[in-house]
Structure formats: C-alpha cells, structure tokens
Amino acid sequence: MPATPAWPLKSAPRLFVDAPLETGATFTIEGGQAHYLIKVMRAAEGGVVILCDNVTGEWAARIGSVGKRDLLVTPEELLRPRDEVPDFMLCAALLKKDRFDLVLEKACELGAAKIQPVLTRRCVADKLNLDRARAILVEAAEQCARTALPALAEPVKLDGLLKHWEPSRALYFADENGGEVAAAAFASHTGPAALLTGPEGGFDEAERAAIRAHSAARAISLGPRILRGETAAIAGMALWMGTCGDWK
C-alpha cells in the first residue's frame, strides 16, 4: 500500500492572494491564478495549494469545488509567519525594461524590504508600470518561497530622494569613480541601510557631487570593473546581505 504523502505536499503550487487568510475561511480564486491552478497545475478537489497574503504568512489550503474559471480554497494550517526581512532598501535608477525587470526579480529573491526606483538625468527609461512591476515581485516571491513582498514605491527624482532622506538610514552610493571598500563600509553600520545604483550611462558629475555631499551618503566601490546598472544592484545587494543581512 503506498505511503500517504506528507501534509502539505512540497510540490504544491504556491500563490499570493489578496484575501486575508485564516483557518476555515473559504474563498474563491478567479482570473489568471485560477487558470494557472486549473489548466496548468490540474488542480482537483481535495488537493493542496500553498497561499500567502503578505500579512499573516504562509498557509496550507485545501481545494474545494473546481469550476471552469474559478475554484474554492480553504486555509487549514499556518505553516510560517510572515518573514521579518532586514531593513534594506534598494534605490535603483530606472533601466531599460528587461534589465529593470531583472533587478526587481533579484531584489525580491535577495531579500530587499523596499525598492525605490530613481529617475536620473541619464536614465533611458522615464516611467515604470507599477502593476507590472508588482506582478514581477509576486512571481519572484512565489518562486523563492518568500512570504513578505518588498514594498515598491513610485519612481522619484534623485533630488527628491536626497531631499527627503531619512537621516538614520545609511545611503551607500555605488560610485563608478570609487569609494570605500563595500564590504568594510557595510560592516561598519548596523542600522537601516540603502544602496543607490545608477542608470546605463552612470550619474553625471552634478548628481555625483550632490550625492557625495549628502550627510547620509557613503561612496563605495564594487570592485575594479565598471558594472552595468543591473549588475551593480544585484552584486551590491548580495554583498550587503552576506555582510549585514540574513545571510550571515
């Protein structure tokens, strides 16, 4: 007789939902998520799905009746509370769409608490589809088993970012002209932190001077080579997480 599979199934699909989750609170899944569960994952009554609501955490839920375009699910067990991620913010200059998509995806996977898109003089892109960007973050969180979605802010101009900066948050500036060794600079500060990375053409001299003049800013070097904007963001985040974040 075959062994009964463990509850919940490790292979169960994983989704973020807008509904607040609690034991026994049956609700309906519709739209693209229903299509994914029904048509792609072949969801059937009695099956298991893992749900996250970005508030309480991660739940194992039982699938009830399955229709052509929707299905009922009932949360049965809280598996993990919502993640407590480090207080780290990525301030990334907007890049071409596919490259900024990569930054969003990897920022979520690496554990950023907040993502602040920044507009600079040399940005090729000047706007961001926030709904699409949030969808990328949700998909990344589902893939990496994260239960807390990064907060995503609307793009802000660099001068506005600097003007309204929180004084207690260290602003590490990835300056292609050089600065402190990044790992050493990260390790010397234990409070809230942020990493500022530039666009395809880099910051211009006036922007660089304004950033360096800011009281919270610390120019850092990410090595001897000039990195693309997306590479700098990903490498800098990974180094911070390994030095000060939850990779230690």
Image (spheres, rainbow, N blue to C red):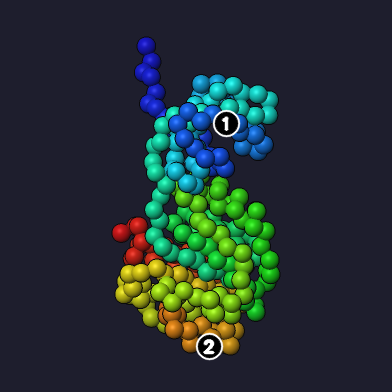
Is residue 39 something that shows in the picture? no
Q: Which quadrant would the C terminus be assigned to in this image?
A: bottom left
Q: Is residue 91 above or below residue 204?
A: above
Residue at image location 45% in from the left, 31% down from the top: 23
Q: Quadrant of residue 87?
A: bottom left
Quarter of the image where one finds residue 186: bottom left
Residue 29 sits in which quadrant? Answer: top right
In percent of width and height, residue 228 lies at 55, 70
Q: Residue furthest top?
A: 1
Q: Is residue 248 visible?
A: yes
Element assignment for label 2: helix
**Camera-side residue: 203 or 24?**
24
Around disc 1, counting alpha carbons within 10 Å, would you say few (fewer than 14), some (14 to 19), or many (20 or more)?
Answer: some
Density class for disc 2 (Cα within 10 Å; few <14, some 14-19, many ≥20) is: few
Q: Which residue is mark 1?
A: 27
Which label sits on residue 140?
Answer: none
